[in-house]
């Protein structure tokens, strides 16, 4: 799987884990769901390049989970600052790890 797709997946799982921890279900399913999610997470983390994973973890501390930002109309959807054509090219044509030059989040599209 593509590195950026893996990061998006990791981000999605982390959000699910976060919301389960905040709002445990009443039917007692939460521990089981959580351990399933943690297993998926491990699996995905194992496939992510170290460079991507480190950047993700570093930003996670800083942004409390909102690490990825989607590119919309060539702008970062988190801070609405336009992305340089150099970065867009690196992201879209080469699939590189690209950060928003303004807020520092990892760009995905
Ligand atoms: Zn940004």
Image (tube, grey):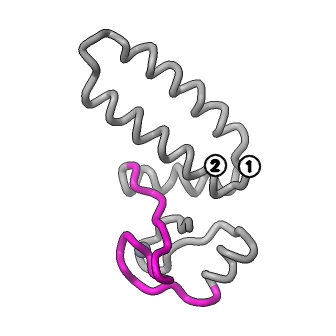
Residue 57, percent across and down?
52, 49
Which residue is pictured at 49% across the width and 38% down the height? Answer: 13
Q: Residue at x 45, y 14 (%)?
A: 32
| Residue 76 highlighted magenta (yes or no) | yes
Instruction: Confirm or deny contact between disc 1 and disc 2 (CB under 8 A).
Output: yes
**What is the CA distance from the residue labelled 1 to the residue labelled 2?**
7 Å
Is 10 located above or below residue 21 in the figure?
A: below
Residue at screen point 55% across, 71% down:
99
- Relative height, residue 6 to residue 24 (above, below): below
Q: In the shown orientation, is residue 83 left or right of residue 27?
A: right
- Specify start and end residues of the magenta stretch as a single range: 65-86
Give the crowd class for mark 2: few <14, some 14-19, many >=20 residues within 10 Å: some
Which x, y percent locates residue 69?
A: 46, 65
Which residue carries the number 2 mark?
6
Q: Residues within 10 Å of mark 1 (few under 14, many from 20)?
A: few
Point out residue 18 in the picture as x, y percentages from the top left corner: 36, 36
Q: Which residue is mark 1?
A: 1
């Amino acid at each position: 799987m593509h590195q950026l797709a893996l990061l998006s997946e990791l981000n999605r799982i982390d959000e699910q884990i976060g919301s389960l921890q905040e709002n445990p279900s009443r039917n007692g399913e939460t521990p089981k769901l959580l351990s399933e999610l943690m297993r998926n997470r491990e699996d995905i983390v194992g496939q992510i390049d170290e460079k991507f994973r480190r950047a993700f973890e570093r930003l996670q501390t800083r942004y409390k989970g909102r690490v990825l930002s989607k590119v919309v109309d060539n702008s970062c959807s988190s801070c609405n600052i336009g992305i340089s054509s150099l970065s867009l090219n690196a992201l879209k044509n080469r699939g590189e790890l690209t950060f928003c030059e303004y807020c520092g989040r990892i760009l995905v599209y």
